[in-house]
Image (tube, grey):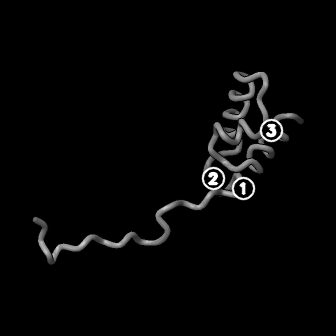
Amino acid sequence: MGDPGLRLAEPAGDPVPQMPETVDETGLEFGFLCDLALKIVYSDTNCTSERVAEKIKLPLGIAEDLLRHLYR
């Protein structure tokens, strides 16, 4: 069996990263995220901001910011 003296290390800090609330918090460039959102919209003609957020795995607020920027 296992060594009774062997212990597993406790995870340091929060094991799940915090969801970013802004584009800056993603660590990704704004232009890269806009390009990604544009590809999603182009490939799905019935696309919604919720769908973009789901596809890029970021909060709805960030997806809406990207789409607002692209709309201008």
- At x 77%, y 22%, the residue is 45
**Position in image of residue 55 (x %, y %):** 64, 37
Q: Nearer the viewer, residue 15 or 25?
A: 15
- At x 13%, y 67%, the residue is 2
Quadrant of the snapshot with the N terminus: bottom left
- What is the number of the mark on residue 62? none
Which residue in the protein does label 2 denote?
Answer: 26
| Secondary element at tag 3 | helix
**Position in image of residue 66 (x %, y %):** 77, 42
| Secondary element at tag 1 | loop
**Position in image of residue 63 (x %, y %):** 74, 43
Give the mark nearer the N terminus: 3 vs 2.
Answer: 2
In the picture shown, does residue 72 fall above or below 14? above
Disc 3 and disc 1 in contact, CB within 8 angstroms: no
Q: CA distance from mark 3 to mark 2?
A: 16 Å
Mark 2 closeness class: few <14, some 14–19, many ≥20 residues within 10 Å = some
- At x 74%, y 28%, the residue is 41
Quadrant of the snapshot with the C terminus: top right
Q: CA distance from mark 3 to mark 1?
A: 14 Å
Which residue in the protein does label 1 denote?
Answer: 22
Q: Is residue 33 left or right of residue 1?
A: right
Where residue 44 sits, quadrant-wise, is top right
Where residue 49 sits, quadrant-wise, is top right
Q: Is residue 58 left or right of residue 46?
A: left
Disc 1 and disc 2 in contact, CB within 8 angstroms: yes
| Secondary element at tag 2 | helix
